[in-house]
Structures are given as C-alpha cells and as structure tokens.
Image (cartoon, coloured by chain):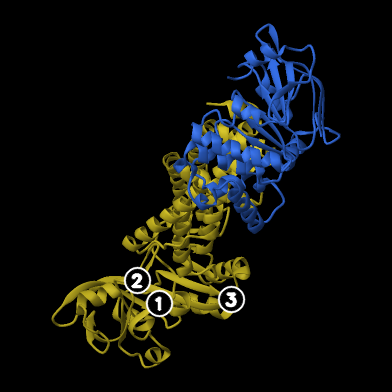
Amino acid sequence: MSLFRGFSTALHSLWDYKGRTTLALLGMLVSSLLLAFLLALLFNFKLTMEGEMQGFGFREIVAMPGQLLNKQFSKSMDLSSLLSVTSMNSDLTYQDAQNVKREVPDVTAAVPQSEVVTSANTGSTSTEVLYTGSTPAYTKVFSIPLAEGRWLNNADVKNEAQSIVLGSAAKENLFGSKPAVGKTVTIKGVPFKVVGVLKPKQLIGFDFNDRAYTEYQMFTDTTSVRHASMIFFMVNSASNLHKADGQIYAVISGDHHGDKGFTLVKPYEALHFLNLIMQLVTAVTMGISGISFIVGGIGIMNVMLLVVKERTREIGLRKAVGAKSYHVLLQFLSESLLISVVGAAAGVGVSYGLLRLLGHYYKAISAHMPLYVVETSLAFSLAVGLIFGLWPAVKAVRVQPMDALRYE
Amino acid sequence: MISLSHVTKTIADGRLKQRIVDDVSLSIDEGEFLAIVGPSGSGKSTLLNILGLLDKPTQGEYQFGGESVLGLSGGRLATFRNRRIGFVFQSFMLMPRMTVLQNVELPLLYAPIGRRARRDRAREVLDQVGMLTKQKRTSLHLSGGEKQRVAIARALVNNPKLILADEPTGNLDEESKRAVLDIFLRLRQQNRTIVMVTHDAEAARIADRYLTIRGGRIASEAIRSDEGARVPVAVGIETDEEAREGAPS
C-alpha cells in the first residue's frame, strides 16, 4: 500500500467521522492560531521597532547634553539608559559638529539641531511649532520623505535664504489640505517661504510632524538659542562605530576643555535590549502555545482511541486479508497527522487573516507572516500528531484479527 | 495441499483449561471442497481460523503446500493470507461506506499490484458473481445475498489457493442462499479448494467431503458419492445415524 493510498484511506476514514474529526481539528486550529498569531505579532512588533531604529540608522551616534550617572562604565550609552541621564543645559555647538567632521575621518556627516517652541502664522492662521535649525545634511541622518517640494539645500545656506520646510502637522494646521510650497509663513517676525513639506513620520522620542525647519545659521540669527540641543553624527561603517565614538568624545571634550556635560548615544545598541525582551516574550509564547498544543494533542488522542475502538472489526478485516502491522500503524498515524496538520494549517490561515485585520486598523504595525512562523506551527503540529497518534495506532496494531472479527 | 497433524487449541477460562480443538489431524487435497459441520461450540470455527492462519494452535503441525506455516512471523503470515487464502464470513464484513468495487479491491491494496490492474481484477471477479453492475454502490445499499456475493468476490480477488467460508449462507433468505450456493458450486467445478463451515445441510451437500466436529474432535467423515449420497469413510468414529443427528437438518 503506497503512502498516498495510506493518506487517501485516512482521509476517507476521517470523513466518516466528521463530527469528531472537526472537534479535534478545532483543538489544533486554536493551538496553532495562538502560536502563529502571537509569534507573527511579536515578529511584526519587532519589525516595527527595528524600523523605528532604522529611522535613526545603525551607523549613527548622537551627542546630547547631560551625563550618565555611572559614567565609569562607558563614555557612551544606549537608548535604554536615557533615563539615567542628568538634565542640564546644552553646551554643544555648531562648531563642535564642524570640528568632529573635520577631525574624525570615519564621520561622514555631522548635523547639529536646535529648536524652540514658537508660533508660526500665515496671516490668517496661526499655530505652535517646533522651530528647528539644522543643515542640509540632515537628510543623511534621517530618511525624510517629502510630501511636497524639497529639503533645505546648500543654496539656502549660501544665500541665507528665508526658506522653511514644514512637518506634516504644522502644514496641516497652517494650510489644511491645500498645497503649502511657495506660501509664506512668519516665524519670529521673519517671513519664510515654504520650500517643502514632510510626509508624516514617527520615530521614538522624536517629533518630526510639528516642526518647521530652517537653516541652522538662520535659526540662531532669529532666536536667542546659541547651543545645539543635539548633534547627529553619521559614521561610514557600523564596524567603525566604537572607534568613532571614542574619537568624537575626545574631540568634543577637548573643545570644551574637559567639561564633560554631554553624552554620546548609539541608538543601534538599543536593539540588543529590544532583542532581549523579544527573546523572553517569544519563549513565554512558545511555552503557552506548547501547553495549548498538548491539550490539542490530547483531543486528537481521544478521538483516535474512539476511532480505533469503533473500527476494531475493520482493523481485523484488513489484517485478515493481508494488512501488515505497519500498514495499520501508517493508516492510523496518517489520520492523526492529517487532523493535526490540517488543523494547524487552518490555524495559520486564520492567524494570517487576523494579522491583516489588525494591520488594517493599526497601520503602525506591519502584517507580515514570516515563513518561520508557518514552519514552527507545522513542526509543532507534526510532532503533536505523531506523539499523540502513536498510542492509538499501536493499539490498532495490537488488535488480533480473530478477536476483531468477532467484535460487536 | 493442506495437512493438519494432531492440532490442539486450548484456551484458559479462569483456572479451567478447555480444549476447543482436540487432536485433529486432517488433509485437504487441492481442488477439494470440504464441509465442516457440527453443533455450536464444537470448535469448527476455531478450526477454520487455524486453517486461515488467523489463530495459532496450542499444539500440532500445520503444513500448507508443503510449507510449515506455524513458525511464520506476523508480517509473513499476513502476506501468506493475502496471497493464498480468501475469507468469506457469515456477517459479510464489508466496509459500509466503501463502494462494492473498493470492498473487493481491499486485499489487493496489500499486494504488489498497480491501480489499473487492481481495478480490472476486481471488476473481473465482480462479473463472476454477477455484481459488476452494482460496483459503484456502497454496501449499505445491498441486500444480504448481494453483500455475500461481494464478499465472495473479495475472497476470490487475489486468486487464492484456499477459500475459507464461515457460515456463508447463515444470514441469508432462501433465494439469496441459492444464489450464493450456485457460486460455490461453480467454484467447485473450477476445482477451487474450499473449506466451508456450515449448519446448513443443503450447503454441506455440495461439498466433496463432509466432516462432523464434536467436542473439538472429528466425529465422523463422509464423502459425496457420484449420486450425491453421503458415504461414511472413517470407520468407528460415529454411526451414520449419529452423524445425521449431528448434521444440520
């Protein structure tokens, strides 16, 4: 009897017991749904978080005012220890950025940023914005998708142009749904020409949408702020991150005559923290799902034991006409495997549907079903089908044909 | 072709040991039709199960085609049954949700034969028992006689050396019984080796040889004369009158 024939026979036999088969299938469906949905959710959560991190990039170092309390351990820190930074006024300057760019060869871009909350108005409309000064190289640090126009350029710097780029919320508040490029926005009494509008963008701890960006020199000329709130450094390679970190620290602290009122942050390192959390949650998920699979497996075993009992005469007949032990074993194992794998496949399908539904309502979360989730669910179900189908199958093998033929 | 020598089957019933088959020696020639009769509990079905390799005797020797078969492993016994023995049961033993054709094909699933050949062979034997037109029906929709004809087709499908029938007419009405006996008559004419356990005198009458079992032993043995009369061959076992009493009326 071929393997295909064995599975075909198993399928027909299961069809004869639709009610019980459906219940056992449902058990496996729920187990698989739980595992696949939670794993996929975790995967997508991690993907979203990594996307946020990548918004920063993996080759960046951020200089920010403040000191880490236990600085003896490290000159730099990751995002997870931000809460340990003491608050203080910034001494970072535009010149610090220029010096690092000049003296640290691995640094390909050094971008200062400074901001104040102020009002912006169009003559008819007014709103609060984060008036921000930065440089054209800002786009080397952050990927900034534009809804309209362009980003600040070197010509703006050279010509001291009164150009401004609006974040999506700032533009919405000032101009509604109408195009903004070419219009005038007055900030700090200066009439700026809107040259670009950003698409909505979110990043942990950063608000892009309420900002109004102008060139750094223009910003300092129009405000009393003289220090950068942050300086973003782009390093040529992730492998040089550690080396560059030390050099940047040396340059800035040298400029500040040893005053160490700043800290260097490597956002990439926060990923390790994220991975640690994800591993923990994944282990818990697998544990809970494993228990659920065991319950589903017990359901399968229950159904298969009943099936073996009810089909004792059939087993006897098959043995009488030539079925060997492995034929019987294969037939009943095929049945339990079919229940578990079909149930698991249905569970994965339903979880994919749920994921898409979730992604539809919560756009921030991606809705991918990674292959390893499908593989894990099917592997779990195969194992459950084999383990929990084995005992009923062995019971079927042990049926003596003569006793079975007499069985009523 | 078949030789049983001093075969005994003992079963334990609590502390009591009971001999179901008691020192039976028996030879069956190729092409012979043997009927085994006897009262209920006499051990005739157990003897048939031993002949069909569904049960093992406690003592004795069993040779099939010159081969000693009692020492065969479970797998080889299954193959032996599949290739050489066809079974017909009183209760038909058909798979209710399978079609007639699938039921007849069942033994061939465990034989080295392709799908097409399997189908062709199953149709051929269904034709022999007059059931080809109903090959696509499930056995749920057949009469008792039709079910038994399908069961006979299943027994024949592997072209076995030996056909064992346990009360094949026991559950049938008169008309169905006649149709089934007609098939057995045709099989006898084809020189098939048949062993039939029966309570039915009419069924037993078509056999070449006739054994009466009592208390697990062969009580009498007779052969069928050319005129159809029963002629005792085993002297001193049982009188003709006693045999008639033991035989089904």
Question: Which of A196/A127 is in front?
Answer: A196
Do dots 1 and 2 share one subunit?
yes
In this rendering, position of residue A91 left or right of residue A406: left
Question: Which of B211/A248 is in front?
Answer: B211
Q: Up-down: is A173 above or below A309? A: below
Q: Which mark is residue A208?
A: 2
At a point 44% along the width and 56% down the height, the residue shown is: A349
Q: Residues within 10 Å of mark 3 (few under 14, many from 20)?
A: some
Q: Colour of chain B?
A: blue
- How much space separates mark 1 and mark 3, taking CA atoms? 20 Å
| Residue type beneath disc 3 | Asn
- For the residues labelled 1 and 2, say whether their Cβ atoms are less than 8 Å apart: yes
**Residue B208 x, y percent position in the rendering:** 72, 31
- For the residues labelled 1 and 3, say whether their Cβ atoms are less than 8 Å apart: no
Chain coloured yellow: which letter?
Answer: A
Of the numbered discs 3 and 2, the one sitting upstream in the chain is: 2
**Residue A338 x, y percent position in the rendering:** 54, 47
Per the image, label 3 sits on a secondary structure element best described as loop
For this orientation, the residue located farthest to the right is: B66
Per the image, label 1 sits on a secondary structure element best described as loop
| Residue type beneath disc 2 | Phe
- How much space separates mark 1 and mark 2, taking CA atoms? 9 Å
Q: Residues within 10 Å of mark 1 (few under 14, many from 20)?
A: some
| Residue type beneath disc 1 | Ile
The residue to which callout 3 is attached is: A236
For this orientation, the residue located farthest to the front is: B227
